[in-house]
Amino acid sequence: MKRMLKLTVRARTGDQFEGRNLADSLLDLYKKQGIGGATVSQGIKGYGLRGAAKIDVLGLSVSLPVIIETVGDYEKVERVLGAVKKIVGTNGMITLEEVNAF
């Protein structure tokens, strides 16, 4: 067992950073910083400070929740935290928690 940090970002499918998809921007950052892996999960419903997440079939818009998670060594996760905050900005929520990895 090893104590590690889990970094979770909750945002929306269409959120962007500098013209790129937010989730892609985070995955690229994690890879470049040597974090071993990350997962992007698509939600089906949700709500938050920016209102309800939904699909508008007639308007062809998608605004569904997306969760981007990574687990890594303390040093690596703490090293990327500032950049993650910049990428996410006001587009979502960032959580950080200690986990036991096996």
Image: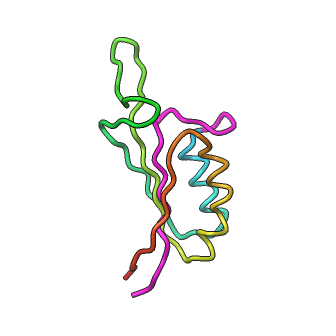
Q: Is residue 81 left or right of residue 37?
A: right
The image quadrant where one finds the C terminus is: bottom left
Q: Is residue 8 magenta?
A: yes
According to the image, what is the colour scheme of the structure? rainbow
Whether 11 is drawn above or below 5: the answer is above
Q: Position of residue 77 (x, y in %)?
A: 59, 69
Residue at 40% x, 17% y: name it.
Answer: 60
**Quarter occupied by residue 84:** bottom right
Q: Residue at x 34, y 12 (%)?
A: 58
Q: Residue furthest bottom?
A: 1
Q: Which residues are magenta?
A: 1-20
Point out the residue furthest to the left here.
44
Q: Locate residue 68, reporting x and y percent.
A: 46, 53
Residue at image coords 57%, 69%: 35
Tell me if 94 is positioned left or right of 82 in this view: left
**Location of residue 25 with respect to 91 vertically, above or below:** below
* Residue 31 spot, x, y in % from top left: 61, 62
Q: Does 43 appear above or below 79?
A: above
The overriding secondary structure of the stretch rendered in magenta is strand
Quadrant the N terminus occupies = bottom left
**Residue 32 point in image, percent of width and height:** 67, 62
Of 4 and 27, which appears nearest the observer? 4
